[in-house]
Image: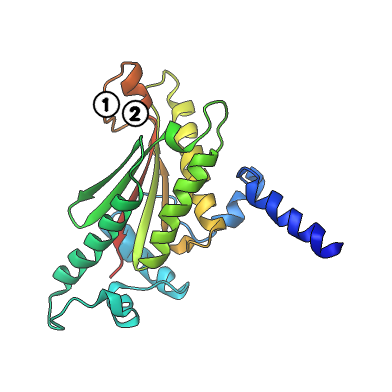
Amino acid sequence: MKKLYLFFALIVGACAPYVSPDRLSWSEYLYGASFTDMTEMSRAAKRPVYLGAGGHVIDDAIIKNAQYEYGDKNMSDNAINIAYMSKVEQELYDALRKAGISVQRAGGEVVVILVRDAIMRLDAPEISETGDDTLQTIEKILKKYEATYIEIAGYTDSMRDTNASQRLSMDMAERVAVHMSKNHILTARMFIVGRGSSRPIAGQDDIGRLTNRRIEIRIAPAR
């Protein structure tokens, strides 16, 4: 009887919708993350903490994983980084062919743009069932390509109250970061920011406003 109960409990747990932990516990989930923009300078400052927490650089990943072999061992660091990030981009692109989601290359980095309504509930500030599935897909790839830093940035559409806009964008970014932490993405890799209504990518008509409400996950090589 006990085994049967555990079996049904596992089934129910697997079917239950994702719910973010209580906000008071978020600081515990996000311990080790940086709440600042991911710049070259901030990555350099974070590197000792990142390595001390068990983070990997690309050279280590190539040695550890045979699938990251790129031929000539004398290849330049830059070429190795480009080849590594090309694989990250391709796997994300292949796995995320869904409405409201795009994968883009930005120099040596990869950016995943998630329109809010593609990953969050329409009636509440909570990750949706579809969003949970999408984030788990991204997390699986981030675990495979672990020699990367991650910036999670929240954005809103234009709002009269800039303080409310800032809070809302940060709430979205932190919710996604907590989800990643719960799914064992190293927080020392993370930079978390809320940018409010800055950097719009569409107009301010009805469709554009929906597009501007988004999360951007920017992935950069750790070296």
Residue 96, how many percent across, how many down?
35, 47
Q: Amino acid at mark 1?
A: Ala
Residue at image point 51% right, 38% down: 171
Residue 67, how many percent across, how many down?
29, 75
Residue at image point 35% right, 81% down: 64
The residue carrying pointer 1 sits among few (fewer than 14), some (14 to 19) or many (20 or more) residues within 10 Å by Cα, namely some
Residue 175, how many percent across, how many down?
52, 44
Residue at image point 32% right, 46% down: 112
Q: Say if mark 2 contacts mark 1, CB within 8 Å.
A: yes
Is residue 171 something that shows in the picture?
A: yes
Residue 163 lies left or right of residue 209; in this view the side is right
| Mark positioned earlier in the residue sequence (2 or 1) | 1
Residue 60's place in the image compared with 219, above or below, is: below
Residue 175 lies left or right of residue 215; in this view the side is right
Q: State which quarter of the image contains the N terminus.
A: bottom right
Is residue 34 something that shows in the picture?
A: no
The residue carrying pointer 2 sits among few (fewer than 14), some (14 to 19) or many (20 or more) residues within 10 Å by Cα, namely many
In the picture, the disc for residue 8 is none
Residue 57 lies left or right of residue 135; in this view the side is left
Of residues 47 and 177, the one drawn nearer to the viewer in this rendering: 177
Residue 216, how many percent across, how many down?
35, 43
- Here the colouring is rainbow
| Secondary structure under the numbered disc 1 in the rendered image | loop
In the picture, the disc for residue 202 is 1
In the picture, the disc for residue 211 is 2
